[in-house]
Amino acid sequence: MAGYSRESERQNKALKAILRGDSPDKRIMVASVDREFKDFVKKEREDEQKRVDEKLEATKEARLPWFCPDCKRIMKRRLDERMWYLHGHCFECQVEVENKMMIDGTFDEWEDKKVNANKLAWIRDKKQELVEFKNQKDMEAYNQVNPDGHSLEKEKWTQNFDELKKQAGEAIEHLEKIEESLK
């Protein structure tokens, strides 16, 4: 007989008993749950949710919200994204802020501060690059000669590194003077 099992045999006996007018055998199902395993799975789910929440919290500031926190407009334009990362609100809010500053007469001062801050940041970056260049031992460059990704060729430079480091020091001093004049 195809598909014959104990369950089908039990069902057949129950049907025969019902047809005869008898009551079928009562069947009691007892479900047993492994408490330790259930607690372990629950703890695993909670730990995973905590990890997900921590990751979401870490990237919360880096994500663009759907709505501007100031005016509640939808932030869907490219300009909104840029203004969000720069100022923490949408482009329309930034236009309103700058318009108020123009009316108050404080816009030029604010603009000068922004320009100086950008210049100082650029100078600090260049100074850091020059300090790293000056503190390195010898200039080395490697070129990949074969497409296999393993064969490298070391370049040999015949520059006067002492002279280059001296020029780097002079450039750092010059950048420090410019930085002091901007402060």
Image (cartoon, rainbow, N blue to C red):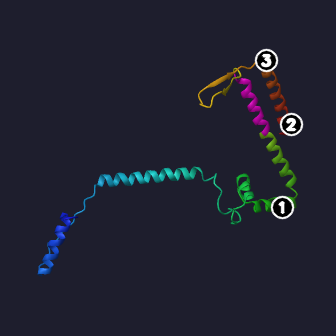
User: Residue at image x 56%, y 52%?
Assistant: 57
- x, y (%) of residue 168? 79, 25
**Front disc: 3 or 1:** 3
Query: Element type at marker 3?
Result: loop
Whichever of labels 3 and 1 marks the residue nearer the N terminus, that label is: 1
How crowded pointer 2 is (Cα within 10 Å; few <14, some 14-19, many 20+) is rated as: few
Could you tell me which secondary element the residue under label 1 belongs to? helix
User: Label 1 amino acid?
Assistant: Asn
Q: Residue at x 28, y 55 (%)?
A: 34
Residue assigned mark 3: 160
Which quadrant of the rendered structure holds the N terminus? bottom left
- What is the span of residues highlighted in magenta in the rendered image? 122-136
Residue 181 is tagged as 2
Give the CA separation, mark 1 to mark 2. Answer: 30 Å
Q: Quick check: 88 above or below 18?
A: above
Nearer to me, 111 or 8: 8
Residue 183 percent coordinates (x, y): 83, 39
Residue 55, position as x, y percentages in the image: 54, 50
Residue in view at x 83 percent, y 61 percent: 99
Assess whether residue 128 is covered by the magenta stretch.
yes
Quote the CA–CA distance across marks 3 and 1: 55 Å
Of the two numbered discs 1 and 2 on the same chain, state the one appearing first in sequence.
1
* Gap in angstroms between the C-alphas marked 3 and 2: 32 Å
Does 55 sit left or right of 46 as displayed? right
* Label number found at residue 99: 1
